[in-house]
Amino acid sequence: MPVPIAYIDGIGLLGPGLTGWRDSLPLLAGQQPYLSQATVLPSPALLPVAERRRSVAIAKLTLATGLEATTAACLNPATLPCVYTSSGGDGQNCHEICQTLASEDRQISPTRFHNSVHNAAAGYWSIATGAMTPISVLCAYDASFGAGLLEALTRVMVDDAITLLIACDSPYPEPLHLARPLADNFSIALVLSPVASAHSLAKISIGLTSDTAHTLDDPALEQLRLNIPSARSLPLLCALAQGKNGRVVLDYFDHLRIAVDITRC
């Protein structure tokens, strides 16, 4: 069976104390101490005014990191097929719907309802960028980033097409937070290409393994990795930031992990 291979042509990143890929490089490379600060969600300026008012946290995350990655790769986001993955969609919107259903007035607003579906963020992406390309939307609980990475590399190989991977997570307020504690908003986007380009940062190939997942030396970054499913990507991002060839093992399922071999371009 062929080993899935792709070139990373652009990266987007937004999370606690991480305000973009370029600005986060010194932190991820271990050159500066990482300080966790609440994620600041930018306004989704590309959306029409009405959709901008209705947009939820997960849509803002998707647009911020997806546009950062495609801009770095010098690509028009409207032309790229996309794989979107999240462990649970928008936590705040889910909370508001549950709160309404538990009240005497159980009328759910149309805005809340259309934001409740798992592919809502993908819809906002299409509206903002004008993309009419295929979008796969996945959810695999804590394994969601790994599932998205496998799906995206499969698309790169099978379709021979540059593909955008976006992984996002958004926290739940109490009382849902007690049952599903997610520390903060977090998103990563990767532009994955079947061939090298002038913008390629690294070549990656992946496979499944039973090896133990890599942990991070920085205790605060390691806590972030453990607390947010999409942050399971951090060992890969740290390896890329350090500019070294090597192998990282990412969390996937309890009995199965994903091994990523990295070759710098």
Image (cartoon, rainbow, N blue to C red):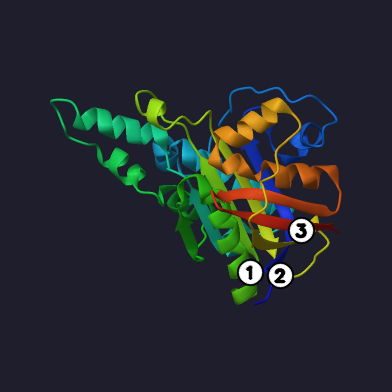
Q: Is residue 241 found left or right of 85 in the rendered image?
A: right
For the point 69% across and 50% down, which residue is it? 249
- SS state under label 2: loop
Q: Is residue 221 found left or right of 202 in the rendered image?
A: left
Q: Nearer the viewer, mark 3 or mark 1?
A: 3
For the point 74% across and 26% down, which residue is it? 34
Residue situated in front as seen by the camera: 251 or 104: 251
What residue is pinned by disc 1? 156
What residue is pinned by disc 2? 194
Q: Quadrant of the N terminus?
A: bottom right
The answer to whether 167 is drawn above or below residue 177 in the figure is: below
Q: Position of residue 115 (x, y in %)?
A: 36, 43
Q: Amino acid at mark 3?
A: Asp
The answer to whether 25 is drawn above or below residue 167 in the figure is: above
Q: Is residue 77 found left or right of 114 in the rendered image?
A: right
Res 82 → quadrant: bottom right
Q: Position of residue 220 (x, y in %)?
A: 68, 26
